[in-house]
Image: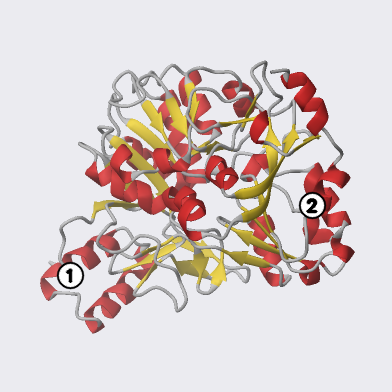
Amino acid sequence: MDYKAMYQEKLTTAAEAVKIVKSGDWVDYGWSAVHPRVLDEALAARAEELYDVKCRGGVALWRPAIADAPNAAEHFSWNSWHMTGYERKLINEGMGFYAPMRYSELPRFYRENLDPVDVAMFQVCPMDEHGWFNFGVGASHIIAMCEKAKKIIVEVNENLPRCLGGHDCNIHISQVDMIVEGNASLVELPNGSISEVDQKVAELIVEEISDGSCLQLGIGGMPNAVGALIAKSDLKDLGVHTEMYVDGFVDIALAGKITGRNKALDRGRQVYAFAAGTKKMYDYLNNNPECMGAPVDYTNDVRVVSQLDKFMSINNAVDLDLFGQVNAESTGTKHISGAGGQLDFVLGAYLSKGGKSFICCSSTFTTKDGTVKSRILPTLNPGSIVTDTRANTHWLVTEYGKVNLKGLATWQKAAAIISVAHPDFRDELIAAAEQMKIWRKSNKR
């Protein structure tokens, strides 16, 4: 077939392409860095013609253009699978909502639980000679989204890294309805700064990692600190299997610490569902056969993760309570991010032979008025979300130490958690534990 001729037949402008969107439609965007850019802007320009268009995406690295349309909430809603700061603001503006999920289940949501997608639109790499468009750094769940889409519009961006090696990370031109060329610059996600607390927590975690371990890092200062320490360590033959590929992995790989030779699955490959970071990371992923983009129902599947020996999962928490319940999603009822894949990896790492999952956080935080508060609470604040249940939490790490919470009775667990709380809050936490009948006098010995 003449794919170049087919390309020209389907090539159009963004303004023409989004004319297929009707009031009441569900319009699904790509994930994170592959959110559409010019298509989003063109859809925003049609705001006054449309009503109740429900857009869906997640991990937005910039503010969606539809949010800046006049009276945006009257025309559009933004429904996020996992929120960033840009998306949180949309909640307060009356047009943003969160769609709860366990990330590994997202492709199945599309295939089994959601109504058909009226329009799917997302960025892709330029078409290859065989007529395929690569999903770049956003494989995640896009193929499942396309399977349920009535219409598919791709926005070609020559700046998008071509990510190799996985399955369900390309779409053929024969499956595409319209093609738009965008070529927007990639939005970078800067590395978070590393605090003294992050550094101390990272040191405690890296002590638990041995040669041949397989790594999953979350996002933020603490995972960045772990990555930086590993890059400077004597560790060797590490593997990578993660949902989000971040700059920390590049630093570890360039330091010669990653070979993946001990992985039972995808030997020698760094596996991930999507990526967001700096230009250094995007350049590293581009056409790199060592790296493997794959759908999230593979990367985050507990059954897959459990087959990777010495799996090390490292993630953050907002706060937790004396029962061992972890909240990584909200401050009370105020939404922050989402469930993501944290529980996927908490479960998978514990099932892995020699595996460990670490939930890490600073022991305290300071409010805007200068008040210091404990992240370790007697019980979670009303409205807080339980991301990891008390039965699933494995290792807890703060700057005051690390504790393994598996197998402990409630009084033992309370004592262990309090032992890594800030000293200024320990007495009141003990008093609360006593009141809740999860404390024994012998704990004080």
Looking at the rendered structure, the secondary structure element under dot 1 is helix
Image-quadrant location for residue 10: top right
Identify the mark nearer the N-term, 2 or 1.
2
Above-or-below relation of 349 to 174: below
| Distance from Cα at disc 2 to Cα at disc 1 | 60 Å
The residue identified by callout 1 is 411
Position above or below: 354 against 319: above
Q: Nearer the viewer, residue 319 or 10?
A: 10
Residue 366 vs residue 191, the one in the foreground: 191
Left or right position of 48 against 384: right
- Give the residue at mark 2: 20
Query: Horizontally, is 155 left or right of 420 in the view?
Result: right
Q: Identify the residue at horizontal 35%, vertical 64% (top origin).
A: 423
Q: Position of residue 148 (x, y in %)?
A: 57, 49
x and y percent of residue 265 in the render? 32, 27
Question: How are the residues colored?
Answer: secondary structure
Place residue 80 in its image quadrant: bottom right
Within 10 Å of disc 2 (Cα), the crowding (few <14, some 14-19, many 20+) is few
Specify the amino acid type for callout 2: Ile
Q: 398 or 16: nearer the eye?
A: 16
